[in-house]
Image: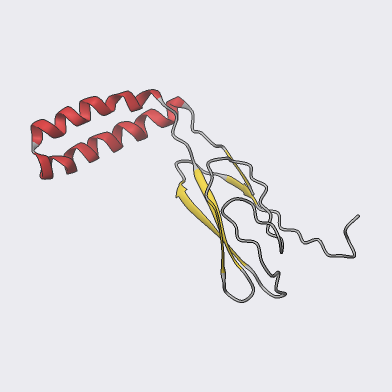
């Protein structure tokens, strides 16, 4: 799986972060009072210096409907493998039952339009070198 862009530009990120700080400060005030919320909002202004990342991840269920794990990583380009005796970190090795497997693409943060590419392949005994 691969997607881009990973980060919004600083010019795109700043208004989003500013709006989030303002709305969270207002919501926080209901719980801790306006003075403490304003102090938190002031401290959070340091986040305006960063670029907002997009974050997409995948999870996998096998042909029997058994959950086979998730690739919840921040990398925008990931190569994940499930084999009988090996699974990439987060994925569970085991039987490779024939049938329809389900890949779920989770969009944790999509702050800007993303291009996503998912390539699925299978290697059988007759296709191995």
Q: Residue furthest front?
A: 85
The image quadrant that residue 82 belongs to is bottom right
In the rendered structure, the answer to whether residue 80 lies left or right of residue 27 reads: right
- Identify the residue at image location x=56%, y=37%: 5
**Could you tell me residue 2's position as x and y percent?**
63, 45
**Could you tell me residue 11's position as x and y percent?**
43, 26
In the rendered structure, the answer to whether residue 50 lies left or right of residue 38 reads: right
- Identify the residue at image location x=55%, y=44%: 114
**Could you tell me residue 109's position as x and y percent?**
44, 45
Q: Looking at the figure, which quarter contains the C terminus?
A: bottom right
Query: Closer to the camera, 129 or 26?
Result: 129
In the rendered structure, the answer to whether residue 85 lies left or right of residue 51 reads: right
The image quadrant that residue 43 belongs to is top left
Residue 35, compared with residue 31, is above or below; it is above
Residue 48, compared with residue 104, is above or below; it is above
- Identify the residue at image location x=23%, y=40%: 24
Query: Closer to the camera, 94 or 7?
Result: 94
**Could you tell me residue 3's position as x and y percent?**
60, 44
Q: How is the image coloured?
A: secondary structure
Residue 12, compared with residue 81, is above or below; it is above
In the rendered picture of this protein, how many numbered marks are placed on residues?
Answer: 0
Residue 22, compared with residue 103, is above or below; it is above
- Identify the residue at image location x=34%, y=33%: 17
């Amino acid at each position: 799986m691969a997607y881009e862009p990973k980060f919004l530009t600083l010019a795109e990120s700043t208004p989003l972060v500013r709006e989030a700080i303002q709305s969270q400060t207002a919501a926080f005030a209901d719980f801790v009072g306006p003075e403490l919320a304003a102090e938190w909002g002031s401290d959070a202004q340091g986040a305006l210096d960063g670029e907002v990342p997009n974050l997409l991840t995948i999870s996998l269920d096998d042909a029997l409907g058994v959950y086979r794990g998730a690739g919840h990583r921040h990398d925008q380009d990931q190569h994940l493998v499930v084999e009988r005796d090996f699974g990439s970190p987060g994925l569970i090795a085991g039987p490779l039952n024939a049938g329809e497997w389900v890949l779920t693409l989770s969009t944790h943060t999509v702050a800007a339009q993303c291009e996503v590419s998912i390539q699925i392949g299978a290697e059988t005994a007759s296709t191995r070198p």
